[in-house]
Each structure stands twice: as structure tokens, then as C-alpha cells.
Image: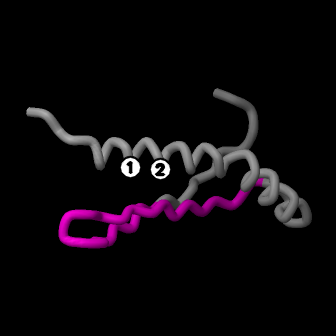
Amino acid sequence: MPPGNWVSPNVDFPIDSATPTRTRVALAFDVDPPVPRILKPLANRWLRRSIRPLHVKDLQQLKDLVEAPHVR
């Protein structure tokens, strides 16, 4: 087990119908970093810069999966 505090993020995937044949999926991700209150703004800034690219990549992969033609 890695050192440090575990966090429990809240993740939500709101799905909306854009058109009759297209669906829009968004990622709502919320987590409080396990740091003292005075350091939270700094931790949040670091998390946005380091984790956002991962979320963008995850959403792109989800989009590619959903939009790929399914062969049976």
C-alpha cells in the first residue's frame, strides 16, 4: 500500500441526448486533497495541472469507445 492519505473522489458522468443519434457525455470530478486547510489552494492548483490531462485522455478514450462501430 502506498504511503499517504486515501481520498474518495466523487465522479459523475452526466449523459445528455444531443440529437436523436448522438449523445453527449461529460465528466464531473470532485475531490478534496488530504492536506491542511491552509495548503488546499496550492494543492488544488497542482492537482488541476497534473490530473486534468489524465481526465482529458480518459474522456477521449471513452468517446472513441462509444463512437466506434460495434461489430458483432
Question: Where on the picture, by quarter, is residue 6?
Answer: top right
In the depicted structure, whether residue 28 falls above or below residue 34: below
46 on left or right of 64: right
The residue where tag 1 is placed is 63
Residue situated in front as seen by the camera: 22 or 46? 22
Name the spot of residue 4 as percent of width and height, x first: 75, 39
Q: Does the segment drawn in magenta span residue 15?
A: yes
Magenta span covers which residues? 12-34
Amino acid beneath label 2: Leu
> Where in the figure is residue 62, as x and y percent of width and height?
39, 46
Find the residue positioned furthest to the left: 72
Three-letter amino acid code at disc 1? Lys
Foreground residue among 43 and 65: 65
35 on left or right of 53: right
**Relative to 9, is 12 on the left or the right?**
left
Q: Are marks 2 and 1 in contact (CB under 8 Å)?
A: yes
Q: Is residue 33 left or right of residue 17?
A: right
Distance, label 2 to label 1, CA atoms, is 6 Å
Outermost residue, top direction? Answer: 1
Say if the magenta span includes residue 46.
no
Residue 35's x, y, as percent? 81, 55
From the image, which quarter does the C terminus lie in?
A: top left
Rendered image quadrant of residue 20 = bottom left
Q: What SS does tag 1 mark? A: helix
In the rendering, at what x and y percent does residue 8 appear?
A: 58, 53
In the picture of the structure, the residue carrying the numbered disc 2 is 59
